[in-house]
C-alpha cells in the first residue's frame, strides 16, 4: 500500500497505466481501477463502487465517466482533467500503433490466436465484477430489492432481444410485472 497522497500527475499516471495494459473496455477497466485505488489507500472499494454507480448515469464511456468522478473526488478540477487525459490518450495512441501493426501482421496465425484469447478473458472479468457487487447488494433489504429489479430488467431485456417480433406485448407485460414486483419488493424502513 502506497502512502503517497493522490495528485493530478499520479492520477494521470495511474489511469494511463491501467488503460494501456487493460483490454476489453469499461467493465474490464472499472474493477482494475477500484483495486488500484484501494491498494494505494486513496479510496475505499465501497466508496469507489458508489462513484461507479453514479457514473453510469452520465453519457459516454463508463470508464471515462468513472475516472473523471474519481479525479474530482481526489483532486478536484485538475484531478478530473488528469483522469480524462489518462483515460483518453493511451487508447488513442495504442489504436494508431496497433492499426499499423495489424495492417502488416494481422493475417499471421499467432496474432489471430492472441486476439481470440484476449477476447475470451473479458467475460470472466465482467463476471467477477458482477459477483463482487452482487454479494454487496444482498447484504441488506434495500440491496436485495435493487438486485431483484436488476434481474427483472435483465430478463426483460433478454426476452426483447430473443423475441423482437413480440416486443410490444413483452414490453407491456414486463412493465406490468415490474410494477407489481415493485410493490412486493419494497424494502422495509
Image: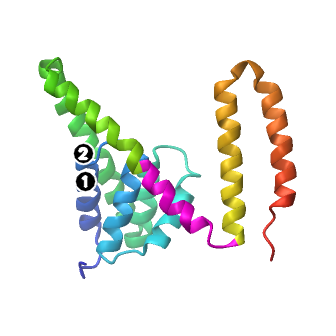
Q: Contact (CB < 8 A) between labels 1 and 2? A: yes
Q: How many marks?
A: 2
Tell me if residue 129 is in the magenta stretch: yes
Tell me the number on the disc at residue 71: none
Q: Which residue is mark 1?
A: 16
Question: In which quadrant of the rendered view does residue 163 lie?
Answer: top right
Question: In which quadrant of the rendered view does residue 7 lie?
Answer: bottom left
Place of residue 55 in the rendered image (x, y in percent of width and height, measured from the top left):
52, 56
Q: Nearer the viewer, residue 183 or 44?
A: 183
Separation (CA) of disc 1 from disc 2: 6 Å
Q: Residues within 10 Å of mark 1 (few under 14, many from 20)?
A: many
Q: Nearer the viewer, residue 12 or 131?
A: 131
Tell me the number on the disc at residue 90: 2
Q: Is residue 159 above or below residue 131?
A: above
Q: Which residues are magenta?
A: 126-140
Place of residue 96 in the rendered image (x, y in percent of width and height, measured from the top left):
21, 31
- Which type of secondary structure does the marked residue at label 1 adopt? helix
Q: Nearer the viewer, residue 40 or 189?
A: 189
Q: Residues within 10 Å of mark 2 (few under 14, many from 20)?
A: some
Q: Is residue 79 above or below residue 89?
A: below
Quarter of the picture holding the N terminus: bottom left
- Which type of secondary structure does the marked residue at label 2 adopt? helix
Place of residue 134 in the rendered image (x, y in percent of width and height, measured from the top left):
56, 60
Place of residue 47 in the rendered image (x, y in percent of width and height, measured from the top left):
49, 72
Q: Is residue 132 visible?
A: yes
Amino acid at each position: 500500500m502506497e502512502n503517497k497522497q493522490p495528485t493530478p500527475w499520479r492520477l494521470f499516471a495511474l489511469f494511463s497505466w491501467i488503460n494501456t495494459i487493460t483490454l476489453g473496455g469499461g467493465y474490464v477497466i472499472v474493477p482494475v481501477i477500484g483495486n488500484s485505488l484501494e491498494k494505494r489507500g486513496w479510496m475505499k472499494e465501497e466508496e469507489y463502487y458508489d462513484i461507479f454507480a453514479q457514473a453510469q448515469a452520465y453519457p459516454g464511456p463508463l470508464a471515462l465517466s468513472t475516472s473523471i468522478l474519481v479525479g474530482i473526488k481526489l483532486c478536484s478540477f485538475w484531478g478530473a482533467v488528469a483522469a480524462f487525459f489518462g483515460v483518453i490518450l493511451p487508447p488513442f495512441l495504442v489504436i494508431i500503433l496497433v492499426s499499423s501493426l495489424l495492417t502488416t501482421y494481422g493475417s499471421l496465425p499467432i496474432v489471430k490466436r492472441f486476439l481470440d484469447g484476449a477476447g475470451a478473458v473479458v467475460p470472466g472479468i465482467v463476471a467477477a465484477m458482477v459477483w463482487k457487487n452482487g454479494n454487496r447488494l444482498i447484504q441488506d433489504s434495500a440491496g436485495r430489492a435493487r438486485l431483484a429489479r436488476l434481474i427483472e430488467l435483465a430478463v426483460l431485456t433478454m426476452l426483447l432481444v430473443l423475441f423482437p417480433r413480440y416486443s410490444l406485448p413483452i414490453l407491456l407485460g414486463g412493465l406490468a410485472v415490474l410494477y407489481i414486483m415493485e410493490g412486493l419488493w419494497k424494502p422495509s424502513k
